[in-house]
């Protein structure tokens, strides 16, 4: 698998990745491979014909990396539209393990979306990283109205299937977060 990932990274192909996040659930991810370790993969995700930020996923959950005739043609269109010129990342993110990822992203001051996509968990947490511990990350989640929770949410690294950052959704929503007013 690592050799296949390396080959697509070096060729700068837009690939489709099939991740088995639990016994009965496969998640599809599209994008350009920017880097990987033995445990984690960094993608510059795509949504139709635009780059859509970054995601880190687990290597052990990848079941298939597709680059078929349709993907090749899509890749050509991305090149014709000059979207390929924008592929890349301006940050250094340590992909050794989740702890190092969250330490890197916290140092950069980036808010994240952390997902646990398995059917029995299925959580979505968005906000700034408060702490990157040895077994858990702590994120101050905010709700659909932009209100921060009163205390950080702890997320077990083992349950994480995807971490997104520097997406339009995260960046715009994060500009308009707020705290609940406290009584006098």
Image (cartoon, rainbow, N blue to C red):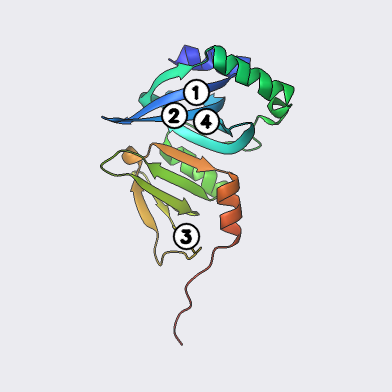
Q: Which residue is mark 3?
A: 144
Q: Which structural element holds mark 3?
A: loop
The first of marks 1 and 3 along the sequence is: 1
Residue 141 rendering spot, x and y as whole percentages: 44, 57
Q: Distance of mark 4 from mark 1, alpha carbons?
A: 13 Å
Residue 181 rendering spot, x and y as whole percentages: 48, 77
Q: Which residue is mark 1?
A: 16
Q: Residues within 10 Å of mark 4 (few under 14, many from 20)?
A: many
Residue drawn at 63 percent across, 20 percent down: 75
- Pick the residue in front: 153 or 27: 27
- Pick the residue in front: 44 or 25: 25
Q: Residues within 10 Å of mark 3 (few under 14, many from 20)?
A: few
Q: Distance of mark 4 from mark 3, alpha carbons?
A: 27 Å
Q: Which residue is mark 2?
A: 28
Classify 156 as above or below 46: below
Residue 42: numbered disc: 4
């Amino acid at each position: 698998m690592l050799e296949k990932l390396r080959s697509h990274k070096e060729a700068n192909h837009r690939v489709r990745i099939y991740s088995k996040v639990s016994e009965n659930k496969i998640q599809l991810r599209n994008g350009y491979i920017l880097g990987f370790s033995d445990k984690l993969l960094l993608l510059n995700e795509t949504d139709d014909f635009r780059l859509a930020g970054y995601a880190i996923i687990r290597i052990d959950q990848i079941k298939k990396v597709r680059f078929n005739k349709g993907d090749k043609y899509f890749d050509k269109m991305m090149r014709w539209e000059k979207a390929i010129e924008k592929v890349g990342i301006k940050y250094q993110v340590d992909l050794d393990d989740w702890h190092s990822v969250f330490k890197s992203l916290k140092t950069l001051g980036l808010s994240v979306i952390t997902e646990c996509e398995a059917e029995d968990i299925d959580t979505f947490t968005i906000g700034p990283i408060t702490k990157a511990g040895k077994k858990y990350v702590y994120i101050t989640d905010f709700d659909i109205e932009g209100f921060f929770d009163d205390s950080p949410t702890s997320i077990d690294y083992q349950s994480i299937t995807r971490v997104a950052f520097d997406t339009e959704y995260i960046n715009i929503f994060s500009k308009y977060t707020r705290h609940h007013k406290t009584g006098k």
